[in-house]
Amino acid sequence: MLFRKLGQPSVVGEIAAGLILRPSVLGRLFPGLFQAIFHPTTAEMPAVLFDSLLGWVLTTLSQLGLIFLLFLIGLEFDFGHLRWQGKAALGISLAGIALPFALGFGLAHLMHPLVAASIPAFEFSLFLGTALSITALPILCRIMMELNITRTRLGTITISASAVDDALGWILLAATAAIVHAEFRLFDSLRMIASTVAFAAFMILVARPLLYRWTRATLHRHEGVLTVNNLAVLLMVLFGCAMVTNLIGIFAIFGAFILGAVLSTEEQFRLAVNHRLRDLVTAFFLPIFFAYTGLRTDVGTLGSMTLWGFCLLLTLAAIAGKLGGCGLAAWFSGFSLRESVCIGTLMNTRALMALIVINVGKDLGVIPDSVFCMLILMALVTTFMTTPLLLRLVSGTELEPYIRQSGFLFLPANRGASKESSAKSAEAVSD
């Protein structure tokens, strides 16, 4: 509610709320409260043992939350957007992967001797390039829905480009994870990639028809409601898929995402699952994930001007790669300069997806604490800047009347305009 009043979408407030729990904020302002929540003392258990147990619990709940979340994201993945709107969306999506990856890969070589000397240079560079390439499609969609621009021409092209970008980003992350787990042994890397492709093919060609039959029969029998027993079966399948990809070596979240993606065309099933799971995941598991990420983020690791300089360079590279790369691709595709920067600004949103990728990198051991902190700050900056920058760019574009209707444009003209005039202007743009 607070961030909405500040002109930011509510999802940005959700991210900020979790990260405020980190030691450098809550721990510094209210050390007693922070100690009571995250380091409580009990007579029955030594403090060191209790801290280890609490850390294990938070890690487990965070991983469970990510499995549920990636399943729901896969379930919401609209493959119709992959039928991109001509060459424009394809060019935007490819630029949105290639340029930030190249900038991240190159910057990693500059940073490596000073911040990650104990980590193999290629693996560090590969991951940093991947981290800068991610666009947060779910968060982007939520921001665009709050701004009321999902059905505009620019909105459709941006979502289409982001969907391709997101799919390529996850493939890139899976390949990176396979290479890191195999310690860059070519045979092991190829085996992991082949196993992942085989699992995805099995899910699409074999499991999907069986799952379709089961979901349709279940919902027909129970009038569109997912019963407790059927939910238990679904969770068994979900955790089974997560276990398979974990055994392959590319993290459990990929199995959850693939399961959701193969079921994404079953609209009635998607609604039934959302009714059962979405509120619990959003209200319980996501705050734990954000808090867990915040607790792993220590701004104190950036203890020198050199490290803060690298943090600034990393953020600028991320913005130049996404906003600049996608904006240039849009401009070369025939959009006006203002429209191109609007598309680049939206594509620059990273948010939750970047936080997931960054946590994966930390778990893989390919990024040190200082770079983890830099990437978290980069993800926050690129997300926080999206809405304010877009609101300053929309004047004269097709997006303006739609955003006025959403209530985000608090301009004098908007205060004096009636809902009827806003609706007419939106209708005129649509026509």
Image (spheres, rainbow, N blue to C red):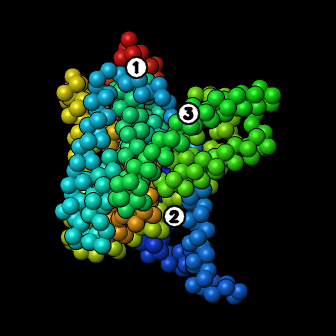
Q: CA distance from mark 2 to mark 1?
A: 42 Å
Separation (CA) of disc 1 from disc 3? 41 Å
- The crowd level at tag 1 (other Cα within 10 Å; few <14, some 14-19, many 20+) is many
Can you identify the residue that label 1 sits on? 426
Q: Determine which residue is flagged by label 2.
A: 292
Q: Secondary structure at mark 1?
A: helix
Name the residue: 21% across, 22% down. 334
Relative placement, left or right, of 199 versus 184 is right
Dot 3 falls on a residue whose secondary structure is helix
Q: Residues within 10 Å of mark 3 (few under 14, many from 20)?
A: some
Indicate left or right for 428 with 240 as reference: left
Mark 3 residue type: Ile
Amino acid type of disc 2?
Answer: Tyr
Choose mark 2 or mark 1, whichever is in front. Answer: 2
Asked whether, in this view, residue 305 is left or right of residue 173, the answer is: left
- Single out the residue that lies furthest toward the front: 187
Amino acid of disc 1: Ala
- 147 vs 186, left or right, is right
395 and 67: which is toward the camera: 67
State the image coordinates of residue 333 (x, y, percent, origin top left). 22, 24
Locate residue 75, reporting x and y percent: 57, 37
